[in-house]
Every structure is written in C-alpha cells, then in structure tokens.
Image (spheres, rainbow, N blue to C red):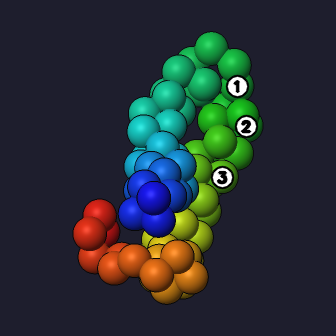
C-alpha cells in the first residue's frame, strides 16, 4: 500500500508534468505564447519539486525511493 502511494506520488509529480510538457506546443499554437510559457514553467517547477521531495515522501511512507527514481 505504501509503495503504491509512493508510485502515485511519482506519477503525479514527476511523470505527469513531463508528459504535460508535450502539450506546450499545442498551447503555443492554439491559445497564446504566454499560456504556453506559464504552463511550461509550472510543469518544470512541479517536476523539480517532485524530484527533490521524493526522498522525503519515501522516508515518510517508509519505502525505498530508488524503486522508481
């Protein structure tokens, strides 16, 4: 259960923002450059924060962080 929670954390805060970055060109094209830049910055910040806090979350849940990272 704890491992599943950590996996969910990794997917939401590291893999999902990375995948979301693929949508940035669409935002640039269809909406506006400003929206695209904001979205890109938000995704990058979320990925970095997710990666930085992953060991802390793993320690809090009591699982080994190197399973997924």
For label 1, the crowd category at 10 Å Cα-Cα, with few meaning under 14, some 14 to 19 and many 20 or more, is few
Vertical placement of residue 10 versus 55, above or below:
above
Looking at the image, tell me whether mark 1 or mark 3 is earlier in sequence order.
1
Name of the residue lying farthest toward the top: 30
Task: Determine whether the residue tagged by mark 3 lies in a helix, strand or loop.
Answer: helix
- Image quadrant of residue 30? top right
- Of 66 and 28, nearer the camera is 66
Looking at the image, tell me whether mark 2 or mark 3 is earlier in sequence order.
2
**From the viewer's perspective, is the residue at label 1 or at label 3 nearer?**
3
Q: Position of residue 49 (x, y in %)?
A: 58, 70
Q: What residue is shown with label 3?
A: 42
Q: What residue is shown with label 2?
A: 34
**Label at residue 32:** 1
**Label at residue 57:** none
Q: How many marks?
A: 3
Vertical placement of residue 37 versus 33, above or below:
below
Residue at left 28%, top 76%? 66
Q: Position of residue 60 (x, y in %)?
A: 56, 82
């Amino acid at each position: 259960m704890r491992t599943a929670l950590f996996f969910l954390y990794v997917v939401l805060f590291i893999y999902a923002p990375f995948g979301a970055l693929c949508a940035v060109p669409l935002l640039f094209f269809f909406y506006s450059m400003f929206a695209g830049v904001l979205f890109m910055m938000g995704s990058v910040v979320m990925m970095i924060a997710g990666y930085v806090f992953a060991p802390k979350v793993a320690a809090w849940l009591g699982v080994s962080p190197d399973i997924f990272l």
